[in-house]
Image: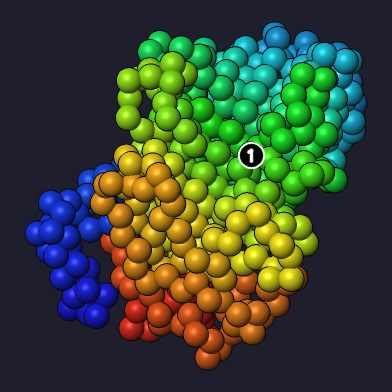
Amino acid sequence: MNHCSLWYVTTLLLVLLIAGEPACGFTPAQFSNLTTPQWEMVVESPPFCPPFPPPGLDQNIEKISSGDIRELLWYVRNSAPHTTLLLEDGVYRFQHGAYLEIAVPWLTIRSASGKREGVVLDGGGHNVTVSANGLTIADLTLRGAEFHGVQIQGNLGVSYTRIYNVHVMDSGQQLIKVSTGDGKSGRFADNGLLACSLLEYTTHSKGTSISSPSYTNGIDILAGKAWVVRDNVFRRIRSQAGPAGPAILVWKNSMNTEIRRNRIVDCWRGIALGLMAPNDYSRGGAAVIYDHQNGVVENNVILALHEPADAAIENSYAKNSLVRHNTVFYNPDLKHAVNWSIEYRFPPTSVVIQNNLTNLPILKRSPLPTKNAMEQGNVTTAKVSWFRDILEEDVHIVQGSYPIDRGICGVQPNRDIDGIGSVIGSVPDVGAQEFEN
């Protein structure tokens, strides 16, 4: 038995004896439920973001002429399920208030060239509204919507949405919105994927005629189950004054969320599992206890380099959060809104915070959690010299730096930002990268 295996068995027994729960707040069976959904396997392989595969033999293929918004709208309304629309490079401009409403199930919309900057859906109320199961959007750009780049109507029970290699930019409200309705209705947007995409404001959020600039997020998931948010870049999710919602917000009693290997740069807030006490829009209604359940936040990089920031990772009314192997660095020359990096608060919250590398403390915040919480193997005194070039977003640690072999063993191998999925050395390194010569 190696050092890590011995550590895990010892810790598991200790926690079982003390708390009556498995180490890290999860049983192996629960972890198996958090693995990649089968329908996402087609794009889940190192280096995590390969070209999106060509249409399958079961797909009808329709080609859309460059910039022809009328042709695109017609095919979106009239195509059969399991149709792929291949858009020729060009700018497809919506009239004011118009949008691409997807009511045909299992539709795919993608660029013919595979170059996401080649096809641009520009303007409209929303660029895309999703009203049917199984939409895939890949290899294109969505920009300048009055409200949302993508709105997924969970209130209609819309699930299995995939967004892959998409650039979403400069919306008036949330760049991607996963909505909900009556929390007791049983209709929610589940089993979604956001991967290998860029979500940003090229300057900052400007708001709308009915909402302030601070009312925005990169992706805002309400009451969704089994969403995977991985290998994306979020930039400048913030208002001109600074305040805005988290780049990744998952709440309203969402469940089983995986947030892995995302890079969040100069956003006001980073990742939030849960936000507030449940209400009628929460999954199960206002009587539920949690705002999020069973989330994994792993191997993400959160940087505040050029503008001040609020908290990087938040756990609020959150059950069984696992926050591990993230790298957080706040430029010490800026005056930030808080003097901590990762926080957990409110009585129902239970969380394991493990092997994170930050240069600001981890805070158990008032009102204090009363459930089991565990902080292990974290380093909160990161120095610029430990990284190759942290101020230029290169978060790789250098040979001989302090985080190497400073972590503690976890309950499953992690796949770091370079795809390493095993421990190199006696114990894991701290942060989002396992050092390899």
Task: Using residue 85 as the reference point, say whether residue 11 is left or right of it.
Answer: left
Residue type indicated by callout 1: Gly
Q: How many marks?
A: 1
Task: Using residue 288 as the reference point, say whether residue 47 is left or right of it.
Answer: right
Disc 1 residue crowd, few under 14, some 14–19, many 20+, Cα 10 Å: many
In this view, the residue farthest toward the left is 17
Nearer to us in this view, 339 or 69: 339
Quadrant the N terminus occupies: bottom left
Per the image, label 1 sits on a secondary structure element best described as loop
Determine the residue positioned at 36% across, 48% down. 368
Task: Using residue 97 as the reference point, say whether residue 369 is left or right of it.
Answer: left
Nearer to us in this view, 385 or 151: 385
Q: Is residue 345 above or below residue 352?
A: above
Work out whether residue 121 can be spotted.
no
Residue 427: percent from left, percent from top:
35, 79
Q: Is residue 160 above or below residue 186?
A: below
Determine the residue positioned at 35% across, 63% down. 375
Q: Is residue 101 above or below residue 26?
A: above
| Residue identified by numbered label 1 | 245
Residue 329: percent from left, percent from top:
62, 67
Q: Is residue 426 above or below residue 305?
A: below
Residue 156: percent from left, percent from top:
52, 12
Q: Which quarter of the figure has residue 319? A: top left
Work out whether residue 33 can be spotted.
yes
Determine the residue positioned at 47% across, 33% down. 276
Residue 73: percent from left, percent from top:
78, 14
Determine the residue positioned at 23% across, 58% down. 23
